[in-house]
Amino acid sequence: MEQWWKKGVVYQIYTRSFKDSNNDGVGDLNGIISCLDYLKFLGVDILWLTPIYESPNDDNGYDISDYRKVINEFGTIEDFLELLNEAHSRGIKIVMDIVFNHTSDEHRWFIESKSSKDNPYRDYYIWKEPKDGHEPNNWTSCFQGSAWEYDENTKEYYLHLFSKKQPDLNWQNPKVRQEAFDIMNYWANLGVDGFRLDVINLISKDESKYYIDSDIKGHKVCANGPNIHEYLQEMNQQVLYRKSLMTVGETPSVSVDDAKRFAPLDGSELSMIFQFEMMNVDGAEDNKWTDRRFKLLDLKRIMTNWQVGLYNKSWNSLFWSNHDQPRCVSRFGDTSTPFYHEKSAKMLGICLHMMQGTPYIYQGEELGMTNAPFESLEDYRDIDSLNSYKQLVEVEKSVAHEDMLRYLRKSSRDNARTPMQWDNSEYAGFSKKQPWIMINPNYKYINAKIELSNTNSIFYTYKKLIQLRKEYNIITDGYYELFMEDDPNIYAYKRINKEQELIVYCNFTSYLLEYDSSYIHEDASILISNYEDQLLGKLRAYESVVFIQKNRKTS
Ligand code: GLC
Ligand code: CA
């Protein structure tokens, strides 16, 4: 089976915030169609669309109420088919986001399921009897509060690892699995090229744990459950294999060894997974509501472990951000001056895109979009942010109001969800109406129009990175080797194949630093850099430079 995604670059679109074609303040499918030439010019090969299905939007579409319908505010199925067609005619593939760990509580299956204990859909979800008049166990949901919700009518609890409007599906029921595969085939038959599978490693629950308390959150207990590989192999056989579809499984709490099983090179399960180990570098034991800043040594250790661990065994996905994470230039770079902003945004792009795997660019990352200066709680829309505030500040009273506002500004998912900044007109060229969430006021000087008009911009660095991946096989096939491993400020690594070597240096600080240049031969040339000239052996603020040279050992 051809593994076309190994040479591809993915661009993630958060439809609600990408481009609004009918000026109702919400991004939509026709908006995406109108930007396809922009995406083609950037050079990306694959678009990942976050969920576009009918949904009451408790969690912005990750609570699906009809898997075969496009949500009205985004358009119609005809708009979707046109998008698919227009993308394909430009050589761009489309990957759909699909959520099968849970549905919306407004999905027809759930409405049936909760109507009575003997309803044929009862067993589509996970219903449990109370234990001593309480929840079966103490699991908390990802979005705060108990992971169990009591139903007065049938006197049982249902499980929801996310919000109570997102009941978990029971994958032990073969009918549920068949429904999921049928839905995937429905979209595959319409011509989509792959799927991003939301929290897919949570779908297999361990029966024996439902009445046992735990000191970790429910979703951690349920990660990588007993039948997960059986289910994914079944999905592979029923949907994926013959169509050569790309799949990326979102899998929190996985190790390198787990990844090898989820995405083996023989194609028997998924094409690749998203792991989140490096997303924990600035959280305190999985609590993202802190002031902590990451340490480069941690990042290097984790990324190296994945680069080395999956080489020739599986395939990495490469990302700095997505719709659940803050903006990467604010988090791992430096936005304190326009100069540092530009240099560090480019440096991050270079650092990631020279690694092995499939890179994912989150919308606006190619412009250097930053976290938003949210001022009050009313500015937030995200259920995770709002529920966390309520829980920590009002219920537990463990965090003060001002502290929580600061943590939210640093880590809220809404940082990634403010509208795409197209130009400096009112509402940033995203819409002609006040959008559903605030626009980052820095759109006046950070926007696509300015970036496109200057060939030295962050946008053009990303464009070049995408081109390089197509031109140089070493970026896809070379093995990875970390050096200067104990340096806390410079990320330096090599990529090596039979013919060539890449030597990558990235300064993660604003200081002038020296690096070990003994690896660079006379025949070396510069593949890409974020400065116009070079000081051999020195790196200026957020400087990044990549040398390419012959591999002397083998050539
Ligand atoms: C995934 C999604 C996130 C969503 C959650 C529940 O983590 O990326 O946005 O809230 O699953 O579906
Ligand atoms: Ca719209």
Image: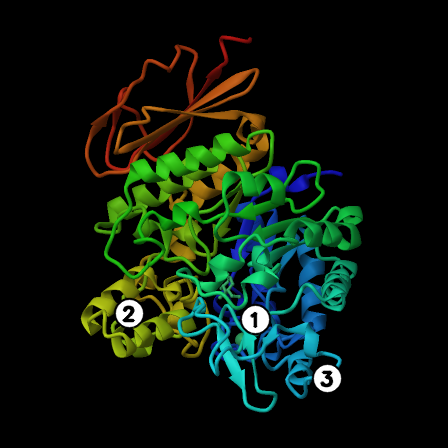
Tag nearer the camera, 1 or 2: 2
Residue 284 visible in the displayed image: yes
* Mark toward the start of the polypeptide (2 vs 3): 3
Q: Does residue 539 appear left or right of residue 468 in this picture? A: left
- Is ligand 1 closer than 8 angstroms to the Cβ of mark 3? no
Return the residue at label 1: 28
Label 1 residue near ligand 2, CB within 8 Å: yes
**Mark 1 surroundings within 10 Å by alpha-carbon count, few (fewer than 14), some (14 through 19), many (20 or more):** many
Residue under the point 31% across and 43% down: 344
- The answer for how far apart the CA atoms under marks 1 and 2 are is 24 Å
Instruction: Quote the CA–CA distance across marks 2 and 3.
Output: 48 Å
Left-right relation of 226 to 377? right
Rounded to the nearest angstrom, the CA distance separating label 3 from label 1 is 40 Å
Question: What kind of residue is marked 2?
Answer: Phe
Res 227 → quadrant: bottom right
Do labels 2 and 3 touch, CB within 8 Å? no
Name above or below for residue 525 compared with residue 343: above
Q: Which residue sits at x=56%, y=77%?
A: 158
In the rendering, at what x and y percent does residue 48 appear? 58, 56
Residue 441 % position (x, y): 30, 66
